[in-house]
Amino acid sequence: MLRTYFPEVVLFLHAFPLNKEMYRYQFCAFEEEGIPYVALDYPGFGDAPNLPGEYTVERLTDYVVNELRKFRVKKVIPIGDSMGGYIMFDMWRRYREMIKGFVFVATRAEADTEEGKKARYALIEKVQKEGKEFLIEAMLENQTSPATKKDENKMRTLRCIMEKATREGIVKTLKALAERKDNTDLLPSIDVPTLVIAGKDDERVTPPEIVKKIAEGIKGAKYYELENSAHLPPFENPEKFNEVVIPFVKDLLKTP
C-alpha cells in the first residue's frame, strides 16, 4: 500500500464546471520552484466519479479534506478559483487548523441572492432536459476575457476541460452552489496571510469590485487585479498569476 507524507502543500481547488487541469500552467511552474502541491477534481468532474446522494459545499469540503488525509497532509495553502473559494471558506469554518494561508481567486464571500438561486435552478432544469452542451457554451462566453477569446488554443483547451464534467456532477454541484452559506461573517476572523486576485475583465461572474470585498474584510490581505483575464486568471494570464502567487507561497512555506 502506498504511504506518503506531505506536511505542507499548496492545494489547487478548481472552478465550475472545470477540473484540476485549469491549473496546468501552474503545475510546471510550481514544480520548477520545488513547491509541493495537491490538485484534485470534485466528484463528477475531471477524473473523479460521482458520489451517491446530493452535494453540498460542506460535503465537497469533506471530500477534499479526506483526500488530503490520504497523503497525510497537515497544512495547506489553498488556491481556489470561484467555487474553489467557497470550499476555502468552509475549510476555515470547520478545518481551520489545516490552513497556513489563502489565495482567493475570482470568487465572492456572499451567498447567492434569491435571483441567483432561481437562475441556478433554471440551469439545473435545462441541463436535465437538454444536456450540458449549452451550459459549456455559456461558460466559455461568460468566464473568459476578450484576450482569451482570441486565443483559439486556449479556448479549445477550456472546452475540452469543461466537457469532462458529467451531467450528474453539474446538476448536483449547481444545487450545492445555490444553497451555500454566506461567508461574509468569516472575513474578520481570517488571520492567516491572504492574497485576493480578480480578473480585470470579469464583468459577468465576479467583477473586481465584488472580489475586492474579500480583501477589504481580511486584515492585511493583499489584492491584485490581473489584466487579460476574466473569471479564470490562472489559466488566462498564467505568467502574471504565477509572478504574483509563487513568491507568496514560497515565503509561506518557509515560515514555521
Image (tube, grey):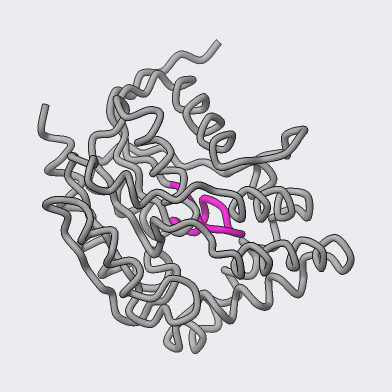
* Residue 137 on image: x %, y %: 68, 77
The residue lying at 33 percent from left, 47 percent from top is 185
Task: Judge from the rendering whether residue 53 lies leftward or rightward of residue 210; answer left or right.
Answer: right
Q: Is residue 21 magenta?
A: yes
> On the image, which quarter does residue 211 sit in?
bottom left
* Above or below for 127 versus 172: below
Quadrant location, the C terminus: top left
State left or right for residue 131 relative to residue 236. right
The quadrant of the rendering that contains the N terminus is top right
Boundaries of the magenta span: 13-23
In this rendering, is residue 104 above or below 35? below
Extreme residue toward the top, this view: 1
Whole-percent x and y of residue 67?
51, 27
Q: Which residue does the image show at 39% across and 64% down from the upper left?
A: 106
Picture coordinates of residue 13, whole percent (x, y): 45, 47
Against 83, residue 254 (above or below) is above
Q: Residue furthest right?
A: 129
Q: Is residue 206 left or right of residue 78?
A: right
Does residue 6 appear left or right of residue 143 in this picture? left
Q: Nearer the viewer, residue 206 or 38?
A: 206
39 is within the stretch colored magenta: no
105 or 32, which is in the foreground? 105
Q: How many marks?
A: 0
Residue 214 sits in quarter: bottom left
Residue 227 picture location, percent across and down: 29, 80
Q: Which residue lies furthest to the front in this view?
A: 114
Which residue is pictured at 50% across the width and 47% down the height?
181
